[in-house]
Image (spheres, rainbow, N blue to C red):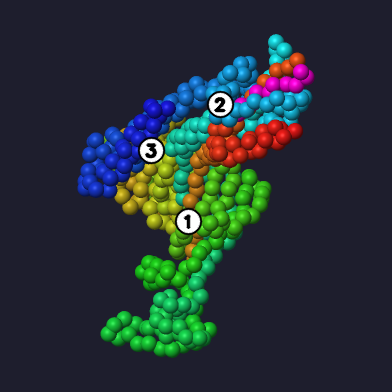
Amino acid sequence: MKFAVWILVLAAALSLLALLAGELLPKSTNETLLFNIFGLSDPFRSWWFRLMLGILSLSLTVCIIERAPILFRQAFARTFREDPITFGMMPLNAKLVVRDGEVKANQLLRKLGFSIARKESNGKVMFAGTSGGLSRLGPVLSHLGMLLLIVGGLAVSLTTYKMQVVGAPGQIVGQPEWGFRLKIDDFRIIYYPVGLNLWVEAPGGRRGRVELVKGDSAKVIFGAPPNARSLWLKTAELSTDFDITDEHGSMPFQGNIKSYVSTVTVLEGDRELYQKKIEVNSPLRERGYRFYQSSFQSIGGQASVDTVVLHCEGEGNHLDLRVKIGASLVPLPWGGYSVAVPQFFNDFKMDGNFKPFSATEELNNPAARVEVYQAGAMIGASWVFARSDAHMGSNLPVAFSLSDITVARGTQGRYATVLEVTKEGGRPIVWAGFIIMTLGLMLTYMLNQRQAWAIVLRREDGQDDVYLAAISQRDPEHFRGNWEEQIAGLRQR
């Protein structure tokens, strides 16, 4: 156990140093080899932090295996004491001379709340009683819960899935690994009512900021100094739910927003399973994935791309090649090469697992996946971008760039929802660890193990010598009062 404590101290110290290094060192340090090797930009996912958690898990496992059998025996076993002399060494002990000693010893121990076992040997009747023995299991369960928390944390660290999806009302979003899709039925932005410091729109389309509110009127400042002027207007004439974007596409009036709500339908194939509203504190949970309402985006419309024009250069030749997305191979006039474009993304992004997706339906960062074939076999593939000569993928014998795309404009949308998708493989293990560790702490601190013993020796005059002893692990003074009260009652009979 001491080893585990030292590992905990070391892990805490190194984590603190890593956090301080990330905060205090210059940003240029983030690119150094040492910084990257030790993962100081994200210490809680670094190899050394995971290694220490693994060592700590091993230490706790050994501790549980070693101590569990002993504590189980102490919790449930009843050990008889056969020599009355040893009773005098117990914190609580007494000797009684009574008739029907066996019956009265049994009654005494049961009144004190003990579960009793009886044994008879060599003319002696012996009792062994225990109460609150489950408290002995508290440390085992606490250690087991801690172990599950660490293992669950490791699983979360190694298996966390995180990405963002963007969808406007009417669109369907999804990824193959989900096993289902989401249809965005509706997206609503909820605005604050007219209040202090909010932007409002007055009749005629003028926009200003509320400086003061009195009753059903508001003082609104229009314009900027030195030409600003104030007007008192009825709050019923003012609105806060106007388009928050300006003519430049930015969102200067975003402070008017109180929250946002997405209404989605979960689809399995073409079958609708159920509908759910996703709010800031009310995520959608489906098959281990969690969908949180993250933010929103202003969108100008949806672009449907059908065909791209690739500028191809290689072996001293160049030409523009028109390729339909997802269609069959298009041959190049040299080298025996053929080209295909199986995928195109309007707004190319990569999620946390380095998987490409389209962040929006607008042509913000168009990219096409170009595959090159020779003799019917694919020899390489690369992502080619419309607004850059850069490419991402394997080296190809032909250089490509996107010189043109064919676009068909679809529906127009005002705002699109942004949902954050997460999945943590170790979450059930973490919850199990939390519950088991809590149960262990409750058993440890809410139950009190007490033990009691009795020996009954028969005398020739018809009475019995009854030897009694007991011990209480916690709160001995309270138990002593009950003990002495019961003993005094027997003495008076």
Q: Which residue is mark 2?
A: 90
Q: Image height check: is 158 above or below 86?
A: below
Tell me, for residue 279, which label it has, or none. none
Tell me, for residue 45, which label it has, or none. 3
Q: Type of residue at label 2?
A: Met
Which quadrant of the rendered structure holds the N terminus?
top left
Looking at the image, is mark 1 or mark 3 nearer the viewer?
Answer: 3
Secondary-structure class at tag 1: strand
Distance between the alpha carbons at the discs numbered 3 and 2:
53 Å
Please report the residue visible at 76 percent of the width from the left and 18 percent of the height from the top: 461
Q: Type of residue at label 1?
A: Ser
Q: Image height check: is 151 above or below 249?
A: above
Secondary-structure class at tag 3: helix
Q: Which residue is mark 1?
A: 294
- 9 or 373: nearer the viewer: 9
Look at the image and say whether residue 183 sits in the magenta stretch. Answer: no
Magenta stretch, main secondary structure class: strand
Q: Is residue 397 left or right of residue 330?
A: left
Asked if the residues shown at circle 1 and circle 3 are in contact, with their CB atoms under 8 angstroms apart, the answer is no
Distance between the alpha carbons at the discs numbered 1 and 3:
23 Å
